[in-house]
Image (cartoon, rainbow, N blue to C red):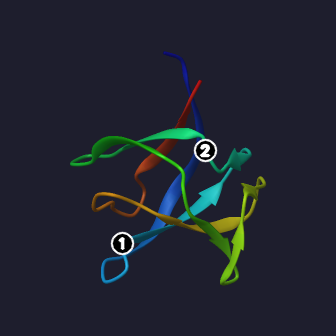
Amino acid sequence: MAEKEIGRVTHYFSRISVAGIKLTDTLCEGDTIHIVGQTTDFTQEVRSMELDNEPITEGQPDQEIGLKVHERVRSKDRVYKVE
């Protein structure tokens, strides 16, 4: 499957398992993403996103969103959309 880089992890909030991601492309609820870093490598479906503590269904380029993740991520991990 083809993958396209759509952003980078900027923060990780371990108590609530949420990653702060700075987007470079659009991301929609239901998309499948692949997060890769030095010690990170997993795929998941996007189910819960927020912008300024409000739920959203689509993130736009240059937005920094909060995304519920299944595993621990680290700052500078790359986020790819699986197409």
Question: Where is residue 30 drawn, in percent x and y?
Answer: 61, 44
Please name the residue that numbered disc 2 is placed on: 30
In the depicted view, which residue is nearer to us: 65 or 30?
A: 30
**Nearer-N-terminus badge (2/1):** 1
Mark carried by residue 29: none
7 horizontally vs 16: left or right: right
Image position of 16 with respect to 26: above or below? below
Secondary structure beneath disc 2? loop
Q: Amino acid at mark 2?
A: Gly
Please name the residue that numbered disc 1 is placed on: 17
Question: Where is residue 20 drawn, in percent x and y?
Answer: 52, 69
68 horizontally vs 29: left or right: left
Quadrant of the image for the C terminus?
top right
Question: Where is residue 17 drawn, in percent x and y?
Answer: 36, 72
Secondary structure beneath disc 1? loop
Image position of 75 with respect to 44: above or below? below
Q: Give residue 25's quadrant in the image.
A: top right
Write the residue at 65% across / 84% down.
Answer: 53
In the depicted view, which residue is nearer to us: 53 or 47?
A: 47
Question: Where is residue 66 drawn, in percent x and y?
Answer: 56, 70
The image shows a total of numbered marks equal to 2
Labels 2 and 1 touching (C-beta < 8 A):
no
Image position of 1 with respect to 35: above or below? above
Write the residue at 48% across / 15% down.
Answer: 1
Q: Amino acid at mark 1?
A: Ser
Write the residue at 75% across / 59% down.
Answer: 62
Determine the residue located farthest toward the top in the rendered image: 1
